[in-house]
């Protein structure tokens, strides 16, 4: 008969069993491949070459969101150190005296010593005012002159108020008009003006004569008379003869 | 009833299992396995399965105050910078070590005094330079020493960036990045950009970094808060560029001593305030799973090393081991050897053999494992030998050893009734013997027994490896 074995017996696992990660939980600092998946951060990459996301948003190109050259906040605000969108046109707007060199089709040039005329570039590298180069965009307005002498019109449609002739209004029929004649400065004769004078209220004093129907009927205030003329002679005269 | 009806046997073997799980609570515990100890200072990792004497310590040449070690060496660089060359830092000096000696003299003359240093904290190699972190009477600094010239720049840290806090300064490096503890701050030096920031991260008022290490493309930072009332482990981006921590795990209401990584597993030494003694755990998922407990003191970042596939650490006044020599054996924790003098400093294993620095009053030494110590013993757990109304009486003890050489010797006694009774001494010795049978055991019937193996009269050259102790006894009616 064998003796009774009363040796202590405690089951102790081998190290490879005891130290088996059996938590079924992501380990602290969990990484899969090049991915770092921390409790509040996802990162892919190393150093500043990182794509990441955290409570701030997503970012690219830095270790952290705040210094990233590209980042988008949770609110959707985007910051990018630079951007290029090939399908969008970037134009340059020039404002100068001389003819600029266009950098893109659609560039605009305001000619500052020529009434700010606006030109549009029809090609890249346009350096002249010509078709396919700098093309005038017809947006020029009219020049309004208010002076005694006859001005030289700049545009068709320019207006001139003749200040020493009761502000008569003339319209330029051509560029460079410098005479009062057909095709140059043409009087703008608003016939309604006389009617307006007649319709003016009482106690108004009119200067000069009032002619009705050419010179056949004339109210001559300066000579205190009313004349009816047959074309040659006064037939009826009321007032001073 | 035949004699055998009352016979019992107890077989003690499998000594590689180290301390009983409750030895840190009760030095006379009944809980444990047949190879486990209630108390011990012995080597069970060098020859797993066998119980052998602790390694002895031999001072390095020049390794005492009679040589050039006139202060406690606080940190030893665990990785040689060249064949048979490493460095260590004391309280006021930087030392140069080989596997056998502390270098004395030369040009520049070793050891080298470090200006204003009062407390060396760590030494690290980063590319072609050695960096030393140290405290002064107020604040601290970082020295830089090119390995090629060994000329020290004593104020490199404060001149390059700023002075350090007066605090522990654990350090670690990877490629061209070096991180270090600086009190409540984590400091970072990136050699590629020559960028030193001694306050890269701030863990807040009342915090103190206990240790740092690099693992899995991530810096692991152990931080204690409120004078060790709470410990936390943080993860930090491997490039050390980020200003934001990556992840964290709480240790709890416990102070962290050190972190250590081996074979991809992070070990944590901490003060388990909920229990007696201290604990070594490992990071399992998002938790720290305690592995084993120990008594003594909480080791620091300056007191850890790898030895025979186990983690060696200081728990004053001794050197302990935790881990399994091979994966197929259980994890053990054991007190491996004495550390020298009463105050232990640095522990490292740069050349394969552990080195330990110690001091006591005006005595200082740095020593390494060499030969066998006679300051070594092993005590089994308490063994209940009662059966109903019967007590147990040991009649025969059979000890199995390797074939003994020279004066190899171990002495065995059996304590009875929780140490009240003690048997005669059984000497395990004899050249060539492997089986030692003792039939005269002067110990009466007991309630419990404990086997004590002492190497006090053992041999410093020839060890006495014990594989098995078989106790044969009988139940005696009382």
Image (cartoon, coloured by chain):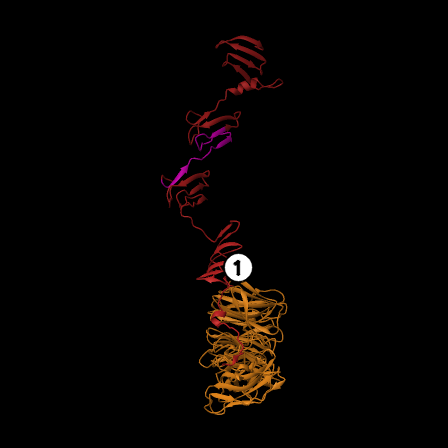
Q: Position of residue A217 (x, y in %)?
A: 52, 12
Disc 1 chain ID: A
Q: Position of residue A61 (x, y in %)?
A: 47, 58
Q: Quadrant of the C terminus of chain A?
A: top right
Residue that numbered label 1 is attached to: A39
Q: Residue furthest top?
A: A235
Span of residues in magenta? A132-160
Q: Is residue A155 left or right of residue A204?
A: left
Q: Is residue B248 above or below residue B405?
A: above
Tell me if residue B110 can be seen.
Answer: no
Asked if residue A145 is among those painted magenta in the image, a careful observer would answer: yes
Q: Is residue B436 above or below residue A146?
A: below
User: Residue at left 42%, top 40%?
Assistant: A119
Tell me if residue A168 can be seen.
Answer: yes
Q: Is residue A47 above or below residue A138?
A: below
User: Residue at left 45%, top 35%?
Assistant: A140
Asked if residue B126 is among those painted magenta in the image, a careful observer would answer: no
Q: Position of residue B274 (x, y in %)?
A: 62, 69
Crowd band around label 1 with a 10 angstrom C-alpha radius: few (<14), some (14–19), many (20+): some
Chain red in the figure, letter: A
The residue closer to the viewer here, B295 or A184, is: B295
Secondary structure mostly seen in magenta is loop
The residue closer to the viewer here, B189 or B407, is: B407
Q: Position of residue B232 (x, y in %)?
A: 57, 66
Disc count in the image? 1
Under circle 1, the secondary element is: loop
Q: Quadrant of residue A172?
A: top left
Picture colour for chain B: orange
The residue closer to the viewer here, B383 or A143, is: B383
The residue closer to the viewer here, A128 or B470, is: B470
């Amino acid at each position: 008969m064998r003796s009774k074995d009363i040796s202590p017996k405690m089951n102790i696992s081998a190290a490879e069993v005891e130290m088996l990660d059996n938590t079924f939980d992501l380990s602290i600092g969990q990484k899969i491949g090049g991915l770092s998946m921390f409790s509040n951060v996802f990162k892919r990459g190393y150093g500043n070459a990182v794509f990441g996301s955290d409570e701030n948003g997503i970012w690219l190109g830095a270790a952290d969101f705040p210094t990233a050259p590209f980042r988008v906040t949770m609110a959707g605000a985007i910051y990018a150190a630079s951007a290029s969108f090939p399908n969008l046109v970037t134009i340059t707007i020039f404002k100068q005296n001389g003819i600029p060199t266009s950098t893109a089709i659609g560039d605009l040039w305001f000619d500052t010593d020529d009434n700010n005329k606006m030109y549009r570039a029809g090609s890249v590298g346009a350096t002249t005012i010509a078709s396919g180069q700098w093309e005038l965009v017809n947006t020029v307005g009219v020049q309004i002159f208010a002076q005694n002498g006859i001005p030289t019109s700049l545009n068709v449609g320019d207006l001139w108020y003749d200040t020493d002739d009761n502000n008569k209004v003339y319209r330029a029929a051509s560029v460079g008009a410098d005479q009062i004649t057909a095709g140059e400065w043409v009087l703008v004769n608003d016939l309604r003006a006389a009617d307006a004078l007649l319709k003016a209220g009482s106690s108004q004093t009119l200067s000069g004569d009032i002619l009705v129907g050419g010179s056949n009927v004339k109210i001559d205030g300066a000579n205190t008379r009313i004349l009816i003329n047959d074309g040659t002679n006064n037939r009826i005269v009321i007032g001073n003869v | 009833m035949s004699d055998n009806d009352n016979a019992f046997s107890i077989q003690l073997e499998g000594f590689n299992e180290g301390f009983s799980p409750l030895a840190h609570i009760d030095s006379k515990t009944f809980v444990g396995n047949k190879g486990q100890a209630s108390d011990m200072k012995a080597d069970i990792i060098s020859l797993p399965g066998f119980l052998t004497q602790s390694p002895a310590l031999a001072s390095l040449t020049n390794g005492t105050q009679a040589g050039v070690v006139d202060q406690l060496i606080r940190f030893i660089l665990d990785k040689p910078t060249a064949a048979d060359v490493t460095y260590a830092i004391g309280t006021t000096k930087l030392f140069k070590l080989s596997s056998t000696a502390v270098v004395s003299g030369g040009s520049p003359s070793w050891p080298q005094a470090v200006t204003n240093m009062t407390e060396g904290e760590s030494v690290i190699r980063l590319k072609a330079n050695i960096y030393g972190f140290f405290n002064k009477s107020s604040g601290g600094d970082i020295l830089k020493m090119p390995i090629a010239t060994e000329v020290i720049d004593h104020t490199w840290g404060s001149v390059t960036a700023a002075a350090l806090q007066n605090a522990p300064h654990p350090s670690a490096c990877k490629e061209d990045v070096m991180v270090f503890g600086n009190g409540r701050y984590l400091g970072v030096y990136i050699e590629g950009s020559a960028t030193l920031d001694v306050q890269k991260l701030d863990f807040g008022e009342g915090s103190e970094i206990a240790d740092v290490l690099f693992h899995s493309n991530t810096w692991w930072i152990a931080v204690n808060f409120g004078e060790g009332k709470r410990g936390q482990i943080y993860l930090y981006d491997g490039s050390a560029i980020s200003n934001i921590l990556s992840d964290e795990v709480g240790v709890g209401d416990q102070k962290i001593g050190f972190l250590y990584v081996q074979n991809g597993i992070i070990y944590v030494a901490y003060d388990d305030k909920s229990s007696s003694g201290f604990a070594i755990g490992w990071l399992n998922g998002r938790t720290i799973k305690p592995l084993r407990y120990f008594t003594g003191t909480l080791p620091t970042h300056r007191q850890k090393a790898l030895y025979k596939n186990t983690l060696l650490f200081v728990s004053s006044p001794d050197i302990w081991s935790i881990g399994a020599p091979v994966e197929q054996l259980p994890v053990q924790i054991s007190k491996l050897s004495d550390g020298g003098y009463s105050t232990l400093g640095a522990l490292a294993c740069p050349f394969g053999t552990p080195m330990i620095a110690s001091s006591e009053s005006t005595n200082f030494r740095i020593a390494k494992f060499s030969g066998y110590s006679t300051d070594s013993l092993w005590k089994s757990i308490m063994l209940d030998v009662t059966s109903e109304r019967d007590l147990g009486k040991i009649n025969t003890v059979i000890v199995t050893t390797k074939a003994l050489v020279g004066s190899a010797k171990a002495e065995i006694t059996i304590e009875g009734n929780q140490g009240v009774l003690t048997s005669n001494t059984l000497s395990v010795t004899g050249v060539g013997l492997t089986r030692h049978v003792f039939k005269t055991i002067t110990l009466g019937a007991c309630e419990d027994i404990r086997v004590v193996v002492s190497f006090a009269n053992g041999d410093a050259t020839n060890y006495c490896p014990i594989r098995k102790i078989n106790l044969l006894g009988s139940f005696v009616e009382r």
